[in-house]
Image: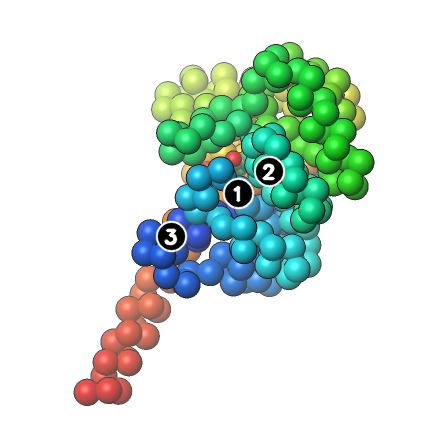
Amino acid sequence: MTAKLGVNIDHVATLRQARRTKYPDPVAAAVLAEMAGVDNITCHLREDRRHIQDRDVRLLRDIVQTELNLEMAATQEMLRFALDLKPDTVTLVPERREELTTEGGLNLTQQKDSFGKSVALLREAGILVSLFVDPETDAIKLAHRFGAQAIEIHTGRYANAVRAVDRKNEVARIIEAVQFAAKLKLGVHAGHGLNSSNIQAVAAIREIESFQIGHSIVAQAVLIGFDRAVREMKQLILLAS
Ligand code: PXP
C-alpha cells in the first residue's frame, strides 16, 4: 500500500497574518493541493490564532473534497469548535503559546481522564480521532486505551538529528513504535519536520499510512513560484509605463 500525503497549510496563513492581508489564502492553497493529488488537508487552529483563523477552517470544511484533518489542543473551547464543525479527523496535539511549533508528542500520563473524555466526545460525533505522540510504546498504549483510532508519530527528533548515527537510531525508534501501533490496529500517521531530504527513510516504513507535511512544502512553493511571481510583476510595470 502506498502511503498517503496530507498537506498542512498553516504556513500559507502565517505569510498572510504577517501583514494581515487577504492573501495568500490558505483555502486557495487547499484547492491547489487537492488538484495536485493530496490525500487530506490539515490545519492547526491554535489558541493564539497565530496563523489559521476560524474563518479558514469553516471555509475548508465546506470546500475540502478529500478529508479535513483539524489539529487542535484538547481544550473546552476547541472541543466545542470541533463538535460543531465536524472535521473528518481531529488530531489532538500539545500546545504551548511560547513554542515556535509543536515541540513534542502529547503527555498522555497527565490528565488521563480528560483525554479519554475528549476522545469519546469526538468519536460520538463521528469524528476519527488521532493522537500526536512521540515514538514510544507507552504513549501508544495509552492512546489505544483512551479509544483513539489512530496515532500520529512525531518525527521531529528524527528530522532534527544531525549525525547519521542519531538519524539511524531515530528511524529504529520510529519503526518499533509504528509496528507496535499497527499490532494494536491503530491507524498510523507520521509528521513534523519532514522535507525532501529526509522523507525517504521514513517513507520506506511500510506501516506508516500517511505523512502530514507542512512547512517544507510551503517553503518549496515560495521558491518554485518566485521566478514566475517576479516576471508577472515586471510585466505589469512594463504594461503600465
Ligand atoms: N503533524 C502535526 C501534528 C503538527 O503539529 C505539524 C506542525 O503543525 C505537522 C504534522 C507538520 O509539520 P511540518 O510543518 O514541520 O511539516
Q: Which amino acid does label 1 sit on?
A: Leu
Secondary structure at badge 3 equals helix
Q: Quick one: label 1, few (<14), some, or many (20+) residues within 10 Å?
A: many
Q: Quick one: label 3, few (<14), some, or many (20+) residues within 10 Å?
A: some
State which tag comes first along the sequence, 2 or 3.
3
Name the foreground residue: 79 vs 91: 79
Q: Percent x, y for residue 62? A: 66, 60
Q: Vertical placement of 140 versus 9: above or below?
A: above
Q: Which residue is drawn at 49% across and 24% down?
A: 104
Q: Which mark is residue 78?
A: 2
Q: Which amino acid does label 2 sit on?
A: Met
Name the foreground residue: 74 vs 42: 74
Q: Residue 17 carries which label?
A: 3
Residue of label 1: 45
Question: Are dots 2 and 1 in contact, CB under 8 Å?
Answer: yes
Q: Percent x, y for residue 220? A: 40, 51
